[in-house]
Image (cartoon, helix red, strand yellow):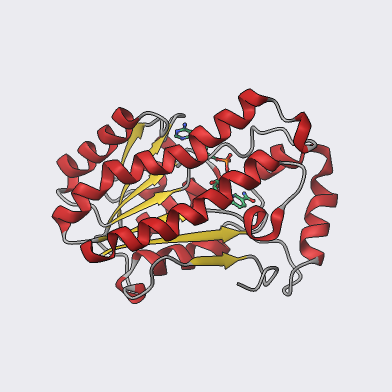
Amino acid sequence: MTVADKVVLITGAARGLGLEYARFLGQAGARVVAGDVADCADAVQAAGNDAVGIRLDVTDIASADSMVELAMERFGRIDALINNAALYGSLRGGRFNQIAEADWDATMAVNVKGIWNCCKAVVPAMRQSGGGSIINIASLAATYGMPFALHYTTSKAAVIGLTRGLARELGRDNIRVNAVAPSAVMTEGTAEFFGDRLDRGLEVIRAGQTIQRTLEPSDLTGTIAWLISDGSSFVTGQTVAVDGGTVLL
Ligand SMILES: NC(=O)c1ccc[n+]([C@@H]2O[C@H](COP(=O)([O-])OP(=O)(O)OC[C@H]3O[C@@H](n4cnc5c(N)ncnc54)[C@H](O)[C@@H]3O)[C@@H](O)[C@H]2O)c1
């Protein structure tokens, strides 16, 4: 099971989990293309190995196309796409009927349409490369049914549906599509999302887990690497929960 020399596109790579994926995969020998609306310099540096960064807005198909063009120019093929970009840390929670319509629409635009855009952009290049692996980052929010952030929960449930339908469409192209559903991981995004309820929130999440500790970013990298690698070549359409055994799928 190796990711060495695999060309991997990571969206939302400027910080948090995307940055961790860039670091881990680059150090494991992958060629990383890091995209984000924010600057990806840290990801490029962390990934090394000829990594390249690009300003990317996943809500804009032309921007997604530019990321793919950059990858093809630089590396000549694309093996994997990690659809990690999302509105998460910046979102405000609240009762379902108090979520601002603009926040609802923005969440769907980034978390759902953004993945659709990046998939549309990357699939022709993957077909050209003979196949590939698309990994969509969902969340325990969807598998558990997290309340008080219904825009986020709904968007992540849509990611799972998108994953299943697209996997069936792309199997004949040897393109696998899977989702990863993490529970709360200690990132800047999680600190922002929970605000002054962080300790209580993590305590409640931990209490629901089979394994009684908080997830760390490094807990996710093995699953991501496996889904990119040929070791998972017969796995598609699945949602892999990395949640310490909270929801048993
Ligand atoms: N941290 C967690 O506990 C947790 C748990 C489950 C799932 N997730 C998911 O994992 C992913 C990363 O989580 P995180 O904690 O690192 O989140 P984060 O909020 O820290 O990072 C998200 C990144 O996406 C980028 N982004 C936002 N809008 C964008 C756009 N339009 N185009 C391109 N990039 C854009 C942001 O700039 C940021 O760098 C997200 O999909 C999140 O929903 C996180």
Residue 18: give x, y in percent of width and height.
48, 47
Q: Quadrant of the N terminus?
A: bottom left
Q: Residue at x 67, y 51 (%)?
A: 186
Name which residue lies at 85% across and 51% down. 200
In this view, the residue in front, 5 or 132, is 132
User: Is residue 24 in sight in this rendering?
Assistant: no
State the residue in front, 107 or 192. Answer: 107
User: Would you place residue 236 above or below residue 114 in this image?
Assistant: below
Q: Which residue sits at x=64%, y=32%?
A: 90
Instruction: Report which quarter residue 246 is drawn in.
Output: bottom right
In the displayed structure, does residue 123 sit left or right of residue 92? left
In this picture, is 166 found above or below 193? below
Image: 74 above or below 228: above
Q: Is residue 104 left or right of residue 234?
A: right
Q: Quadrant of ligand 1?
A: top right
Q: Quadrant of residue 150?
A: top right
Quadrant of the frame with the C terminus: bottom right
Q: In x, y percent, where is residue 224?
A: 44, 62
Residue 155 at what x, y percent from top left? 57, 44
Whether residue 241 appears in this view of the structure is: yes
- Examine the rendered structure and indicate whether residue 240 appears above or below residue 156: below
Q: Residue at 43% across / 38% down in the picture? A: 114
Residue 142 pos. (x, y %):
63, 54
Say whether residue 49 is left or right of residue 142: left
Count up the numbered dots. Answer: 0
Q: Where is residue 105, by image quadrant?
A: top right
**Foreground residue among 207 and 216:** 207
